[in-house]
Amino acid sequence: MSNSFWPESDSSDQPLPEPTVAFPTAENPFEPFTEAQIRGILTNPVYAGVGASQAIVSDRQWVGACVKLIDEDGHEQFLVNLLYVLRNSFGGVSR
């Protein structure tokens, strides 16, 4: 289908970038968060009330933070990070 939203294949000359986010761990609660962990928190829509979680930030705050991340990292990197965060937040396997 030439007018399809989805590309004919997902192969490309260049692979997607690796995720640049991480999840905070409870292993050492006194260590400061890394930049990757902070990016993981900002990217995670769970904090805006997605899933069974109660929102701790407003939609506007979450979207605003994501706009800043997209401006800094680019849309492709943000989307890779978002997929990584969603898969890990909901028990999926990261690719």
Image (spheres, rainbow, N blue to C red):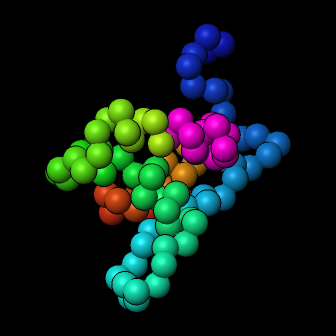
Residue 82 % position (x, y): 49, 48
Task: Tell which of 42 and 84 is nearer to you.
Answer: 42
Find residue 22 and report its horizontal and vertical position in percent: 51, 67
Residue that appears at 63% across and 26% down:
7
Q: Is residue 60 above or below residue 25?
A: above
**Quadrant, the N terminus:** top right
- Residue at 79% from the left image edge and 46% from the top image edge: 14
Say whether residue 32 is magenta: no
**Residue found at the far top of this picture:** 3
| Above or below, 56 relative to 40 | above
Is residue 84 or residue 40 the one in the foreground? 40
Residue 70 visible from this viewpoint = yes
Give how far across and how far down residue 59 sits, in percent.
32, 35
Q: Residue furthest right?
A: 13
Residue placed at 61% from the left, 10% from the top? 3
The reply to whether residue 51 is visible in this rendering is: no
Asked where in the image residue 73 lies, by quadrant, the reply is top right
Side of 26 where 16 appears, left or right: right
Residue 68 location in percent, x, y? 56, 40
Q: Which residues are magenta?
A: 66-78
Q: How many marks?
A: 0
User: Considering the image in quadrants, where does the C terminus appear?
Assistant: bottom right
Q: Nearer the viewer, residue 70 or 86?
A: 70
**Image quarter of residue 78:** top right
Q: Main secondary structure of the magenta part?
A: helix
- Asked if residue 77 lies in the magenta stretch, the reply is yes
* Relative to 16, 56 lies left or right: left
